[in-house]
Amino acid sequence: MPYMPVDKYRLTSMEEPTDKMLAQLMKSACAEANKRAAEAERAYFAELSELVEKTRRNWEERRAAQTE
């Protein structure tokens, strides 16, 4: 198979990737998956923190209303 940069290779190609190219493709896919997972985790915990703060304020308001 002639040299083909990894970013130009498509898995639907009729030509099989070399072992080196396949390893590079898998490494690239892993890096992208890790990046997306880290962003999803950050967004999840940001949303969770927001929900906790909202719930805490709600309970404080209820407690204040009961003591009046």
Image (tube, rainbow, N blue to C red):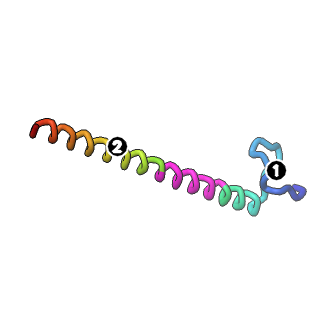
Q: Position of residue 21 (x, y in %)?
A: 76, 59
Q: Position of residue 63 (x, y in %)?
A: 15, 41
| Residue corresponding to mark 1 | 8
Counting residues from the start of the chain, the first of labels 2 and 1 encountered is 1
Q: Position of residue 67 (x, y in %)?
A: 9, 40
Quick one: label 1, few (<14), some, or many (20+) residues within 10 Å? few
Q: Position of residue 30 (x, y in %)?
A: 61, 57
Q: Residue furthest front?
A: 68
Quick one: label 2, few (<14), some, or many (20+) residues within 10 Å? few
- Which quarter of the figure is the N terminus placed in? bottom right
Amino acid type, residue under disc 1 in the picture: Lys
- Left or right: residue 66 compared with residue 49: left
Name the dominant secondary structure of the magenta segment: helix
What SS does tag 1 mark?
A: helix
Front residue of this view, candidates 46 and 6:
46
Point 78% across, 46% down: residue: 10
Q: Nearer the viewer, mark 2 or mark 1?
A: 2
Q: Residue furthest left?
A: 67
Residue 17: which quarter of the image? bottom right
- Left or right: residue 58 compared with residue 22: left
Q: Which residues are magenta?
A: 29-42
What SS does tag 2 mark?
A: helix
| Residue corresponding to mark 2 | 51
Residue 65: which quarter of the image? top left
The answer to whether residue 7 is above or below residue 54 is below
Residue 28: which quarter of the image? bottom right
Point 50% across, 48% down: residue: 40
Point 47% across, 48% down: residue: 43
Q: Residue furthest right?
A: 2
The answer to whether residue 57 is above or below residue 7 is above
